[in-house]
Amino acid sequence: MSLLFANSLLNDALALIGALMCLYYFAKCSWGLLVGARAYILPKFWRTDLTSYGDWAVVTGATAGIGKAYAHELARRGLNVVLISRSLERLRATAEEIEQQQGKKTKIIQADFTSGAEIYGPIEAALKDLNIGILVNNVGKTYTMLPCYFLDVPNVDKEILDIMNCNALSVLMCVLPLLVSTNLTRLETSIFVKQADDYVREALNTVGIREQTNGCLAHAVQHFVIEMLCPEWLRLTQMSMKNLKRSCEKRRLLLEKYKMT
C-alpha cells in the first residue's frame, strides 16, 4: 500500500514538474513573440526619428558591405555621416556617393583598426566638435572563411593580434546579425541571408527600442530557434565545432567543383 502511495506521489510530482516546464516555455515563447513584434514589426509603421539623437552618425568600416549600407541609410534618414575606414580612396568615393545621392554632409577619417590603441586619439580629435547621436561600430576582420584552430592560421601572431585589435578592442554593445550577403561572407541571398541594404533598413528601425538586437525579423527568428534547440554551451562543444568545420569544408569543395564545371 505504501509503495503504491509513493508511486502515486512520484507520478504527481513528475506531472507537476512537466506542467511547470510547459508553462515556462509557453511564457518564454509568448514573451519572445511580443518583444519581437515590438522590435521588428511595429517599427515598420512607426519609425524612430534618428535625427532626434543628434546631427551626425559615425560608421566604422564604412566603405563596403553592411557599413556602407548603414552610411547610406543613415544619410537617407536625415543624418550627416562620418565615415571611418582604412582606404582613403574608397572613403572619398563613398563620401561623394552619399553627398550626391542623399544630399547630406560627410566627413572622412582614415584609420586601420588592426593597428591598436594609437588610432583612437586622432579619431577622438576629429569627432570632438560634432553633435554625434549614433555610432555604428561595424568594422571587422576575418582570417579564414572556415572554422579552424588559431594555430592553423598562417602568420598566426599577426593575424590573432589584428583580429583582437579590430574585432574586440573596437567593440561596444552593437548589433548581433546572423548571415548577411557581403564581400566578406560571399553568400547568396535567401529568406534568411539578407542583402546588406535590406538588413540595415530593418536594423535601424530597432534603434531606441532594443539595447541588443538581431537587426531584422528573419535573423531574430533564427536566433530564437537556435537558442531553443541548440543552446550556446552545446554549439561550442568540441564535437559541434568539428562537425561545423567538416560541413563547411564540404561546402567549400562543392563550390570549387561547381566553379570548375
Image (cartoon, rainbow, N blue to C red):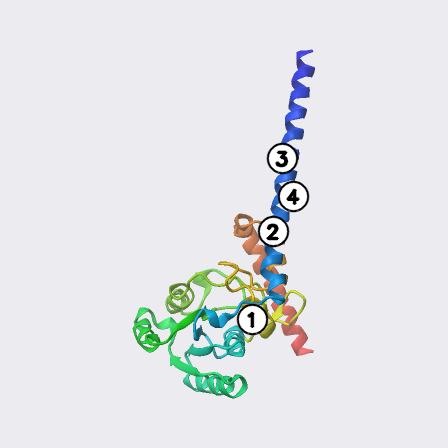
What's the residue at 58%, 66% (across, down)?
Answer: 179
Give the distance between the C-alpha atoms of the residues marked 1 and 2, in whole angstroms: 22 Å
Q: Secondary structure at mark 4?
A: helix
Say what amino acid the circle numbered 3 marks.
Leu
How far across and down, in percent of the image, does residue 195 sit? 61, 73
State which quarter of the image contains the N terminus.
top right
Give the labeled residue for mark 1: 200
Q: Dots 1 and 2: beta carbons under 8 Å?
A: no
Front position in the image: 1 or 97: 97
Dot 2 or dot 3: first in sequence order is 3
Q: Secondary structure at mark 1?
A: helix
> Left or right of 67: which side holds 244?
right
Say what amino acid the circle numbered 4 marks.
Phe
Q: Secondary structure at mark 3?
A: helix
Marking on residue 20: 3
Front position in the image: 256 or 227: 227
Dot 1 or dot 2: first in sequence order is 2
Q: Where 160 sits versus 130, above or below?
A: above
Dot 2 or dot 4: first in sequence order is 4
Say what amino acid the circle numbered 1 marks.
Val
Give the labeled residue for mark 4: 26
Give the labeled residue for mark 2: 32
